[in-house]
Image: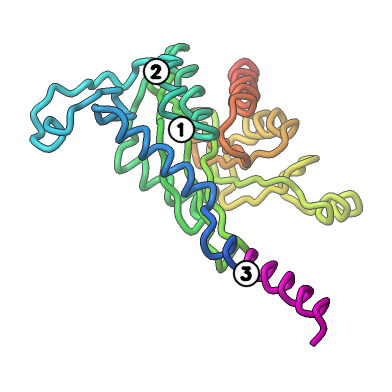
Amino acid sequence: MKFGEIVFYLIVALFIISLAYKFFFSKTQKEKEYERKLKESLADEFIYDPETGAKLTLEQAESGNWIAHNNLNRIKPKEELEQYYKGKEKEIEELANFLKSNGYKFTKLTDSQIEFLEQTKILSKYDDWSYSCSYSFNEGKDFVFFPRVTFNNNRHENGYSESQIMFWINDMSLDGHVYLREKTNFEAFTDMIRNDDLIELDHFETFVFKESTTMIPLLKTLRLLDMQKDLEIEIIEDSLLIKSLKYVNKNDYLRIEETVKGIRLAG
């Protein structure tokens, strides 16, 4: 074998070894983030409780002897967010701060409320969901919370899990059961030729599971929502559910909030 060929095969071998090393030994972004937080935690003499903001010594955490900081409506200072949160996780905390500063109250959903949500078309289609940061407003009648929705690998190529925004509005003028999602391009095209939906909208495909006895306020509400994009909507009796389709962000929150205000005024 000639010297040039030997050099060529050595280069190829080194290239393959380099790729294999990166594949088997390089760390994912999630692993790097975990290590970063672990190092910060170890460097600090205190243990941080992200919910309450309490800082505990290792001895306190092990013994359970400390006074809990139970103000779940406190606004986390900027320094705390910078130190303990990064990326999308930080966006959630910033939006939670915004809600609390505007009078929203931390309110844990009850077992019966969670059971109701588990029966909805919006959330039951996922393989799993959980929630965090649930806040009530309008004298405790309405809620906004961040459901974390998950599709596993056999339903989505790489799996799928992210936190989104969901409004739960109590509206006594509504009844029936209707689910709405955005139309596909094919559905939009065929509806231009022949729209056989019981409730005809421009941008949303409607699925009626129980007809409403109060169609005028229902149609008024749905037509206001028809001007929005990247949403899923469901009405079950007097509950209006509106969920974003993207990771928690303030822009989605503000546009849904503005739509809800419009529905209130129109009612």
Q: Quadrant of residue 14?
A: bottom right
Quadrant of image for the N terminus: bottom right
Residue that carries the numbered disc 2 in the rendered image: 76
**Residue lying furthest right:** 193
Query: In the rendered image, which quarter contains the C terminus?
Result: top right
Instruction: Write down the region rendered in magenta.
Output: 1-19
Indicate which disc, 1 or 3, sits on the residue closer to the N terminus: 3
In the rendered image, residue 142, in percent from the top left (x then y), is placed at 44, 26
Q: Which residue is mark 1?
A: 145
Please indicate whether residue 31 sits to the left or right of residue 214 in the image.
left
Mark 1 → mark 2, Cα distance in angstroms = 18 Å
Answer with mark 2 or mark 3, whichever residue precedes in sequence.
3
Query: Label 3 crowding class (10 Å Cα cut-off): few <14, some 14-19, many 20+?
Result: few
Task: Identify which residue is drawn at 54% across, 38% down.
Answer: 164
**Residue 249: x and y, percent?**
59, 29
- Regarding residue 240, the answer to whether it shows in the image is no
Residue 195: x percent and y percent? 82, 51
Residue 255: x and y in percent read: 65, 24
Q: CA distance from mark 1 to mark 3?
A: 47 Å
Amino acid under disc 3: Ile
Judged left or right of residue 6, residue 84 is left
Q: Is residue 222 above or below residue 254?
A: below
Frontmost of labels 1 and 2 is: 2
- Considering the numbered disc 2 on the image, is that residue within a helix, a strand or a loop? loop
